[in-house]
Image: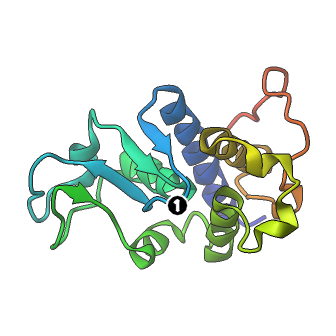
Amino acid sequence: MALEDLARRITAMEIARDVLEMLDKRKIVPVVGAAYLRFFLGRRARRHEELQGLVAGKTCDVCAIGALLLAEVTRRDDLKIGDNWSHTVSMKMSQVHERLKSIFPIWMLHNIESAFEGPDDSSVYENQPCYRDSAAIRMRKIMRNILFNGGEFDRDAWPPRKWKSSSAKIPQIGV
């Protein structure tokens, strides 16, 4: 494994762990079918204002990709608001993918999104228990998948078999 790939995988695991922590602290609310990242600002955002400062103390509605984005932005603290942001802040798919693709390749982002939102042909998976889970439980399973698979989302391990959340050890991050 190349050093760059190892660094990317470690960062992906740290971000997945941060998402789980945000879920525990109720800083994010997983919502199927939501924009990537949405929160009520209560005022107009100023151009070039840092997103991390805007979300501080707020609860954000997120999909799985939005949760990864928020964790990454919180970690790096370098995303500035552009034009056309009003009282409700949201981002376009191309902006989100561009931001995350160095950590989560585009194919992996699509797989994560599909696992969270559900497949396009819901009749194929209608009997899969994971798609009857709440959005929060599904998001936890996705983040745990990333952690257990060394920073990769393993589509072949989705839908997950029974997770023993209390007994399963989350791998330690580090080299």
Residue 175 in view = no
List x then y, in percent, for residue 124: 86, 68
Residue at image x 52%, y 53%?
68
Query: Can residue 54 be seen at all in this image of the molecule?
Result: yes
Most extreme residue toward the bottom, as rendered?
A: 94
Q: Nearer the viewer, residue 156 or 13?
A: 156
Residue type at tag 1: Gly
Residue under pointer 1: 33
Task: Classify 150 as above or below 85.
Answer: above
User: Where on the picture, by quarter, is residue 57?
Assistant: top left
- Placement of 116 over or under 121, stated as above or below: above
152 is higher (above) or lower (below) than 169: below
Residue 54 appears at what percent x and percent y? 21, 47
> 10 Å neighbourhood of mark 1: few (<14), some, or many (≥20)?
few
- The answer to whether residue 174 is left or right of residue 130 is left
Residue 32 placement, left or right of 127? left
How many callouts does the rendering have? 1
Residue 84, given in percent of the width and then of the height, sits at 16, 72
Horizontal side, residue 27 vs residue 131: left or right: left
Q: Residue 132: image x %, image y %?
A: 75, 46
Residue at the outermost top position:
166
Q: Residue at x 9, y 56 (%)?
A: 44
Q: Secondary structure at mark 1?
A: loop
Residue 17 against residue 81 in the figure, above or below: above
Q: Quadrant of the C terminus?
A: top right
In which quadrant is the N terminus drawn? bottom right
In which quarter of the view is residue 148 placed? top right
